[in-house]
Image: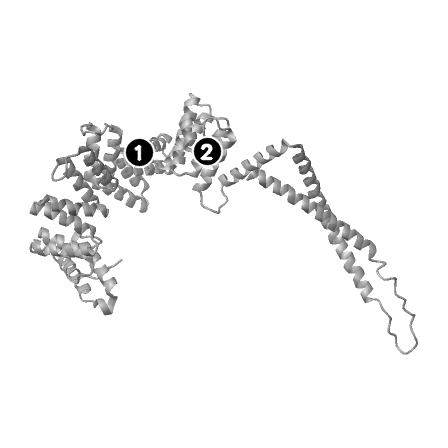
Amino acid sequence: MVFPSVVEWEGLDEEGDLGEKKWDLGVKQLATMSFWGQNAVSKDVASAVRLYRKIAMRMKDADAMYNYAILLMKGQGVKKNVTESVRLLEKAIEMGSVEALNAVGWYYSSIIRNVSVAVKYFQRAALNGSRDAVYNLGLYHLNGEHLRKNQTAAFQYFQNASRSGHAGASVAAAWYLATGTLEGVARDVEFAVRKLKRVSEKNGHLGFTLKKALRAYLQGSWSGALVGYILAAEGGLGLAQANSAHLCQELKFTPECQWRYTNYSVLNYDPHHSGLLKMGDYYYYTYASGGEDSLSLIGQAVSMYSQAASAGSPQGCFSLVTMAQEGHVLPLSVRRWFNVSAHDKLDVLLEKILRRCVEMEAEGTITPCSLALLRLCLDRAWRMMAQNPAQICLTYVALLSLIAVALVMPTQVVLDGCVRQWEGRSGGAGPQHHDLAGPGPEWTPDPAGSRLDRPLRLRRSTEAVLSVSGAMLCVYSTTVLYYVM
C-alpha cells in the first residue's frame, strides 16, 4: 500500500475527496507510521504530532484524542501541556476509551499523588479489559498502598494480566512462582519457566532473526534460512524448531538433524500437533521394525498421539484407534480424556475416540474417522443381530429378497416391452382399404385381449414379487439402523 506524503494528505478535503471516516483512518495510519518510521515512511515526530492534533481537535475519534493527549503529557514533539492532556483524556473516557482511563489513573498516581482517585480509575479500566490497569492494581495490593496489603490478591492480579499478554506481570508472576516467597502461592518452577518462555519468545532479537530466516526462505536460499531458524531453535523457540526440522528433511540432511529439532519442538510447553504426530510415527515405526525396548517405544507413541489429539488433531485420534485395534493398551489417563473408564470394553473406547475425531473434522465431509466410525457401528450391529435367531432368519430373507429384485427387475422390463408391443399390434389392426378394382378380404378381429393375458399375468406376478421383496428389505434396513443408532 502506498500512502501519500504528509503534505499531500493534509491537502485532501475529507468531505469531498475521501469521506470523513476514510480520512480519519488514513490520517491515524499515516501519523503512526510517521511517528515510528514504519512502512518506508521517514520518521518525523513533528509531522505525526501535527496529524494527531488535526484529527484529535475534531473531538470525534477517541483513539486520536488519547494519542495526542499522551504526547502533550510527555511533551514529545510538542510543548508539554498537562492540563490540555487531561482534558482530552477525560473527553476520550466519555467516548469509551479504556486506554484513557488507565492514563488518567497514572496521572493521579504519579503526578498528583492521589492514590485513592488513581485506584478508582484503574478499577474502571480493569473492568473494561485493560491489562495495564490490572497489573497496576496488583502492585497496589502488593505494596499495600490505599488497598489492603494482600499478596495472594496481588499474585492473582499478576496472573490475570499475564494471561492477557502483559510482559511485566508475567515476569512478576514467574518470579514468585520460582521462589515461592509469596504468601499463599505454592512454588512451581516449571510453570514459572513457561511464563518466562512466552515473554522471551516476544524478544525483538529473536523476531529479527526469524524475519531474516523467512526472507532467505522466500528468496530461495533454504540453506541460509536453515541457519537462521537453527539459531532461534537452539534458543528454545518452538516455531523455529519446527521449521528447522522441516528444512532438514527438505534439504535431505542426515535424519538426526530432522529428529533432533522435531524432538525439541515437542518438548515445548505448547507443542504443535504436527511435531507430535511425527514423533509418534517415529516411535511407532521404530517399534514395528523391531527396535529395542518395545514397550517404552509404544508408550512414547501413545503419549505423542494423545497429546496431538488433545491439541485438536484428528490424525492423533485416528492413530490411537489404530493402536487400540492392534491390541495395545491405552493408559487410563488417555481413556479419561475421552470419558472412558477402565471397565469399558474396546468397542466403547473406539467409538468415543472416533466420535471425538469426527467432531474435530470439517462438518459434512467424508473422512477416515467418519468411515471408521460407520464400519464400527455396522460391525456392532451385525454382531448383535447374529445373536438373535429371528434376526438371522430376517437377514436370509432380506438376502433372498435382494436376489429376487435383481432377477425380477430385468424380467419386468422385458414383459413391459412385450405388453406395449402386443397393444400396438392390436390397436393397429382393422379393415383394409383397397382400390376400386375389387373388395379385399374381410377382416375378422381376434377375441378381445386373448393375446395379452399371459404377459399381463406375468407382469402382475413380478410386481407382487417386487412389492414383497421391497417390504422385506425396508424391514431389514430399519432393523439394521436401529442397532446402528
Please state which amino acid type lies under the numbered disc 2.
Ser
Q: Estimate how packed mark 1 is, as few (under 14), some (14 to 19) or many (20 or more) residues with alpha carbons within 10 Å.
A: some
The image quadrant of residue 228 is top left
Residue at the extreme top of the image, as rendered? 293
Q: SS of the residue at dot 1?
A: loop
Horizontal and vertical percent position of residue 240: 30, 38
Point 71% across, 46% down: residue:
468
Residue that appears at 33% across and 37% down: 242
Residue that badge 2 annotates: 319
Does 144 appear above or below 91?
above
Q: Is residue 430 above or below residue 470?
A: below
**Extreme residue toward the bottom, this view:** 436
On the rendered image, what quadrant is the N terminus found in? Answer: bottom left
Color scheme of the displayed model: one colour
Report the side of 460 relative to 31 (left or right): right
50 and 242: which one is in front? 50
Tell me the quadrant of the picture where the C terminus can be found: top right
- Label 2: element kind: helix
**Which amino acid is tagged 1?**
Tyr
Sort mark 2 into few (<14), some (14-19) or many (20+) by Cα contacts within 10 Å: many
Q: Which quarter of the figure has residue 173? A: top left
Rendered location of residue 61, percent (x, y) = 20, 59
Query: Could you tell me which residue is drawn at 50 percent across and 44 percent down?
Result: 366
Query: Nearer the N terminus, badge 1 or badge 2?
Result: 1
> Is 353 placed left or right of 44 in the picture?
right
Count of labels in the image: 2
Taking the image as drawn, is residue 44 in sight?
A: no
Q: Which residue is mark 1?
A: 269
- In this rendering, is residue 435 above or below 179? below
The image shows residue 360 at horizontal and vertical percentages of 43, 41
